[in-house]
Image: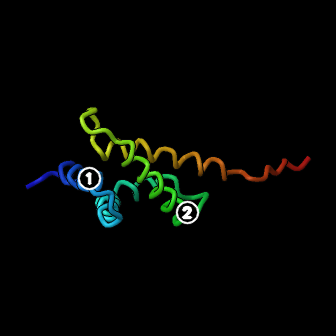
Amino acid sequence: MATRAEVDLENWRRWKKTNSPADLAILLNTMSGSMSKEVSRWQGVLSRSVLETEARRLAVQAFQTYREGTGASLNTHLVNYLQKLSRITYSHQNLARIPEYQ
């Protein structure tokens, strides 16, 4: 039985070879647990749907920049890449500063 990391890597290899939207959808589906965890981590200021959309965009970029054999698993690379979700959250926090009543 293959481990999750092996399945993820095989799905990534298939997508990298074919570059098809169907293979990308399979890859995104297998990695959805990690993406959902990171979205939940930054949820609060923005709606979940906005963060999920941004997470999918970042995930595709992570898949494109992943280099096999560097020592990091695909999941580790994805989670590290999804740390950029904090930027969109922080940029929308405290849009208006309300001064304390004097």
Residue drawn at 41 percent across, 41 percent down: 80
Q: Amino acid at mark 2?
A: Val
Q: Nearer the viewer, residue 53 or 11?
A: 11
Tell me: residue 45, above or below residue 81: below
Q: Which mark is residue 9?
A: none
Q: Determine the residue located farthest toward the front in the rendered image.
A: 18
Question: Mark 1 sits on what residue?
Answer: 17
Q: Is residue 92 left or right of residue 56?
A: right
Residue drawn at 26 percent across, 39 percent down: 68
Instruction: Indicate the secondary structure of the residue bearing disc 2.
Output: helix
Estimate the x, y position of residue 49 in percent, counting from the top left: 52, 66
Question: Mark 2 sits on what residue?
Answer: 50
Instruction: Indicate the secondary structure of the residue bearing disc 1.
Output: helix
Q: Determine the residue located farthest toward the right in the rendered image.
A: 102
Estimate the x, y position of residue 94 in percent, counting from the top left: 71, 51
Lower sequence index among marks 2 and 1: 1
